[in-house]
């Protein structure tokens, strides 16, 4: 088995990762890209999972899509967790100059986000509940959402063609870790 950092360099060459190298390409692709990376790592026998973070502690005035116009407390985001680190292939949707991928200690997520929870632990067999959550956003989605956010003062709605009738929050899949009180 190759070390995780070497495998992450290999994942960087995939179509999914390359699509997320720009802010607009990263926009709204955090779950799909994180799940694709986790599947890649697991295929190479690396134990990993997914983290769900909610409620950014900061605004993102230079972000892609709707983010500059919306309340950051309502943001939801996913990253890969491997070896106690968060690997974020879509960080550029929030910060255009972020590293690609942005790799941080897990503890740093709590400094940036109000809520941090295991979405899928390294023992969970499934990465997503719906196959559509693996689909990448259309390239024009960032521009469409940006315009809608401008027009609605950040209130939306922000339809996503991958989820035409469902904008409900997604519940964690992991039943392995106890619920946090």
Image (tube, grey):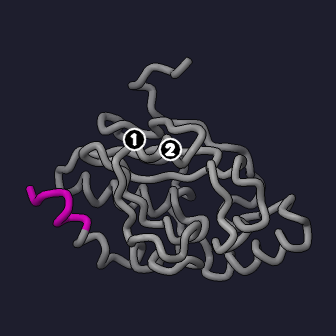
Give left or right: position of 62 versus 26.
Answer: right
Quarter containing the C terminus: top right
Residue 3: say if magenta.
yes
Q: What element carries label 1?
A: helix
Q: Nearer the viewer, residue 9 or 69?
A: 69
Q: Where is residue 10 in the image (x, y as percent from the top left)?
A: 23, 72
- For the record, the magenta segment spans 1-8
- Residue at the image position 51 percent from the left and 21 percent from the top: 179
156, 165: nearer the viewer:
156
Q: Is residue 125 left or right of residue 96?
A: left
Left or right: 93, with 61 as reference point? left
Q: To which residue does mark 2 refer?
A: 111
Tell me the quarter of the image containing the N terminus.
bottom left
Q: Does the magenta stretch include residue 15?
A: no
Residue 114 percent location from the top left of the image: 60, 40
Residue tagged 1: 107
> Do the residues bearing badges 1 and 2 touch, measured as CB atoms within 8 Å?
yes
Q: Residue at x 72, y 48 (%)?
A: 74
Magenta stretch, main secondary structure, is helix
User: Which residue is painted at 76% across and 72% down in the image?
Assistant: 145
């Amino acid at each position: 088995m190759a070390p995780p950092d070497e495998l992450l360099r290999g994942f960087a060459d995939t179509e999914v990762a390359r699509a997320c190298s720009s802010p607009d390409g990263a926009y709204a692709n955090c779950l799909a890209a994180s799940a694709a990376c986790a599947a890649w790592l697991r295929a190479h026998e690396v134990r990993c999972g997914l983290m769900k973070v909610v409620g950014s502690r900061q605004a993102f005035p230079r972000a892609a899509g709707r983010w500059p116009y919306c309340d950051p407390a309502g943001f939801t985001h996913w990253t890969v967790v491997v070896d106690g680190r968060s690997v974020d292939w879509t960080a550029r949707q929030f910060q255009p100059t972020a590293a690609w991928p942005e790799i941080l200690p897990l503890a740093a997520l709590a400094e940036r986000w109000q809520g941090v929870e295991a979405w899928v632990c390294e023992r969970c067999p499934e990465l997503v509940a719906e196959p559509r959550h693996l689909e990448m956003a259309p390239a024009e989605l960032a521009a469409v959402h940006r315009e809608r956010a401008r027009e609605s003062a950040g209130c939306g709605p922000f339809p996503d063609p991958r989820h035409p009738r469902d904008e409900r929050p997604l519940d964690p899949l992991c039943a392995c870790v106890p619920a946090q009180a």
